[in-house]
Image: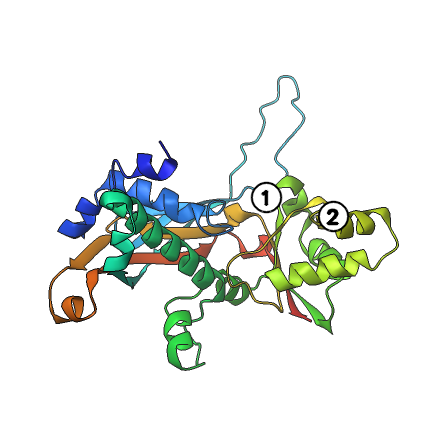
Amino acid sequence: MSTAQRNLEKVTTGDFNAGGLLNRQQFEEFFRMVQDAPQIMDQVRFEPIDAPKAQIDRLGVGDRLLREATESTEGGLNTPNTGSIDIDTVKMELPWEVSMETVEDTIEYEGTADLLVQKFANQFGIDSEDLAFNGDTTDASGGASQDFLSINDGWIKTAKDQGTNEYDHANAAVDKSAFNNLLTSLDAKYRRDPEGLVWLTSLNTKQDYKDYLTDRSTASGDAMLMTGEEPTPYGKPIVTPVGFPDDQIMLVNPDNLVWAVQRDVTMRVTTEGKAVVRRDLYGIYNMLARTDYQVEDADGIAIANNVA
């Protein structure tokens, strides 16, 4: 039995056909599939919440707390840097038309539930990741682009608004200096867990960097050209989120990126009516959800701008 089939024991076409609110078990299963679709959403801090507005715990010790234990002397107590992150979700919708041909192409309709749930999960995951990095409520690009980008502020906008570390690459081509300058812009305390940090770039920027490396007369450059070996600048992997801007690079621990989703996810469905009949549709679905993007600690993020 496939993962999708196991998930569909809890989330089925029947759930969608009836419409209404997904229960908690259905919510958890659905969002496991959502997180599998994009590149980074399964690594960030995912926070299901029970109300449109909430506060979640912030815990960033940061300071050096280890002390020598001296006999017969009472040590001082360390106070962690605790606080909270304010979550203010934004309501969004994912409308989806399912054609009759799509349903008829499944074997005796047995795959309909699998197909519908996967389509919703994949699209919601991909769009959520795109918005997570490109979202800007002040966007004025116009048309459908503005309608999408202005839904909510994403992690790049939020981090910059909170004074994150920024580096200007001055419209130069991506090279090792871009990664080195980002790395050294982070305070040493954020580099003590080097395995937790990842580079986030667009697919184009990653390809340009690979091309830069293959131009060098080195064994690693030759291996990358001949075998497709993946670059890991300073030992950290490059992840390419959906829609990540070509002119920026982010260095971050994914746990520093918070994705909050209110558990009240509603599915509405119409299987009758003029539009359904005239266009030969199986049904028109609309998923309603509330989400928000926040950062745990903007000082623990570094962003390069103007990367050519």
Q: Nearer the viewer, mark 1 or mark 2?
A: 2
Q: Residue at x 17, y 71 (%)?
A: 278
- Element under disc 2: helix
Instruction: State if disc 2 and disc 1 touch (CB < 8 Å).
Output: no
Residue 276 place in picture, x, y as percent: 17, 66
Is residue 55 positioned above or below 134 on the image? above
Picture disc at residue 29: none
Residue 104 shown left or right of residue 226 in the figure: left
Count of numbered circles on the image: 2
> Is the C terminus in the top left, top right, bottom left or bottom right quadrant?
bottom right
Label 2: few (<14), some or many (≥20) within 10 Å? few
The amino acid type, in three-letter code, at marker 2 is Tyr
Residues 7 and 50: in front is 7
Cα distance between the residues tagged 1 and 2:
22 Å
Q: Residue at x 43, y 66 (%)?
A: 153
> Is the N terminus in the top left, top right, bottom left or bottom right quadrant?
top left
Residues 218 and 156: in front is 218
Residues 197 and 226: in front is 226
Label 2 belongs to which residue? 234
- Element under disc 1: loop
Mark nearer the N terminus (1 vs 2) = 1
Q: Residue at x 63, y 47 (%)?
A: 190
Q: Residue at x 36, y 74 (%)?
A: 147
The amino acid type, in three-letter code, at marker 1 is Gly
Residue 48 shown left or right of residue 220 in the figure: left
Residue 284 shown left or right of residue 138 in the figure: left
Picture disc at residue 62: 1
Is residue 141 positioned above or below 69 on the image? below
